[in-house]
Image: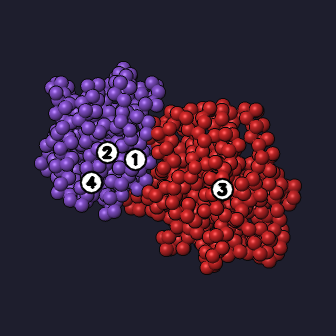
Chain colours: A red, B purple
Amino acid sequence: MSERPDFSAFPDARGHFGQFGGSFVSETLMGALDELTAMYARLKDDPQFRADFDYDLAHYVGRPSPLYLAERWSKQLGGAKIWLKREDLNHTGAHKVNNTIGQALLAKHMGKPRVIAETGAGQHGVATATVAARLGLTCQVYMGAEDVERQKLNVYRMKLLGAEVIPVTSGSRTLKDAMNEAMRDWVTNVDDTFYIIGTVAGPHPYPQLVRDFQCIIGREAREQSLKQAGQLPDALVACVGGGSNAIGLFHPFLNDDDVAMYGVEAAGDGIETGRHAAPLNAGRPGVLHGNRTYLMEDDNGQIIETHSVSAGLDYPGVGPEHSWLKDLGRVKYVAADDQEALSAFRELTLVEGIMPALESAHALAYARKLAPTMSPDQNIVVNLSGRGDKDILTVAAIDGIDV
Amino acid sequence: MRRIESCFQRLAGQNRKALIPFVTAGDPVKEVTVPLMHAMVDAGADIIELGVPFSDPMADGPVIQLACERALAHNTSTRDILGMVKAFRETNTDTPVVLMGYLNPVEVMGYEAFAKAAADAGVDGVLLVDLPPEEALEVKPVMDAQGLDMIFLVAPTTSDARIKLIGKAGSGYLYYVSLKGVTGSATLNVDEVASRVETIRNLAQLPIGVGFGIKDAESAQAVSRVADGVVVGSALVNQIAENKDTPDAINDAVGGILSAMRNAMDQ
């Protein structure tokens, strides 16, 4: 890549990453987005805001999260050393809380007493309900009816945290429909409501601000790699649904040309079956949920239903910055299917005593293939974006066990 | 002169206001749409907004969401809808037709191909609810070259500076969204609308259509006293939903509401 851009300079002022990103929303929301953009531009380099954010990450979330060398698993695979960035050890059990802490601080600065969120696996919903409880904000979480069913534990967690979970029965009854419904709520209650989007998608400035809040993952991993491995990693691997944990890990390394990056999408039953959630592997650019990005759509521009064992990856779009990084060739986007993810889930649990979220298991499934192709003096950092407790019922059901 | 502009000019000369019905194309079946367009004109419609269904209608309430689902259940495509407009134009060359929907089903055709096909079919304007003027810089000249008006929304939350920008970016008319919310929401507040329309008039040169929350002859009449056009959607789509199993009854049900509105507006 002789002509790579300075990745830290994007998005541009109107939220574009090349042809991707932007603000494709109805006029009613444009004022709120402009207000949020202006507020964020003012606060992001404000020393007090940064200090408040860092304080919460350290004392409430429990950062820095460890970079753990999975020695036994690496030896078993026989290749590069695999390091796990332990976002599963964060308060609430996933990387999602890094972002909700940041957006809740913004909501507080903007004087909004009510927050809403969409959620797929429930991790972002839990992280939102958590910060709302802590700040005394009213919280409503939209969740596809199908996801409410397969993520019962997280639904009850949100209720215990004082949030109202609203099942969404329109469309495919999953994450995309929850996002539609959250947008409808926001357009109706825009004066008193802050919409905490959970991933690096949506209209500008969300892809930028969610990325910035999640970049703590990559900044820590970079420092920890230099200290613990004595060098930058040779490869980074992260799962990609909307892509917030991936961009958080990748972004601080984008200008390091020698660090290879792999984003792992959900191949569901297999890309060739059409039943998957892999727009970067098998989609094309279009416009959904406020931004232009790779989408799973039919020839008439209608969004196609997605399939994945992992509710958090079951989304037909992806953050616009990933679309741009794909087209630039900076990140390679690959896919792991349900079976590969489940077997990585079991393997890490048995070999390292760490139970990963099914989302993160997609990243592990690819690392499992990649490591043996590399040498033992090379290093791979895998983002272990969340823990698997929430998925125990799903895995038990697959095993035919009634817990 | 373009059809939309001459329509508003003619009405202004008669001291009348435009009645602008919205229905989703292909709802509940494709065969219904063209006869329904004619029936709406017979009942007093001046401009027809034809909804292009989308799988993810983020700005719409449940009534139009379900209309999209019904139309998509049998794959009503953008090309099908252009075919409907072409069929409508065989006997009606006066009534402007505006396609209203979301960007993706248009963009997937390619801007050039869409604009040419739409102009060829006899479409007059395009209103894409998730395309604010800032993102329309590329598509607007393409539409303009084919004589298609780009109609933009103004909302209760739109700043004065943005109203000016939208007034310059759009042509045909401005669509004032009368309330914060999705289509089919609560009833609008006429005094509030009157005051906002006044503000918009001072900042933009285009005729102003008002939509969202207009449900009956009474609200249509009230809005027609302050705006240049009255847009009615969910109230009509509700009638289509109620008669979805007896499509023959749809023209009368929708026409009945429009006639009552027309009479009230012309009083």
Q: Is residue B225 above or below residue B83?
A: above
Q: Looking at the image, which residue sits at the far top?
A: B202
The chain letter for the residue carrying disc 2 is B
Any mark on residue A222, and which?
none
Would you say the residues marked 3 and 2 are in contact, meaning their CB atoms lie under 8 Å apart?
A: no
Looking at the rendered image, the quarter that the C terminus of chain B falls into is top left
Residue wearing tag 1: B61
The chain letter for the residue carrying disc 4 is B
Point out residue B75 in the picture as x, y percentages from the top left corner.
33, 62
Amino acid type at circle 2 is Ser
Identified at 14% across, 45% down, the residue is B92
Q: Is residue A123 above or below residue A55?
A: below
Amino acid type at circle 1 is Gly
Identified at 50% across, 38% down, the residue is A189
Looking at the rendered image, the quarter that the N terminus of chain B falls into is top left
* Labels 4 and 2: the sequence-earlier one: 2
Q: Is residue B105 visible?
A: no
Label 4 SS: helix
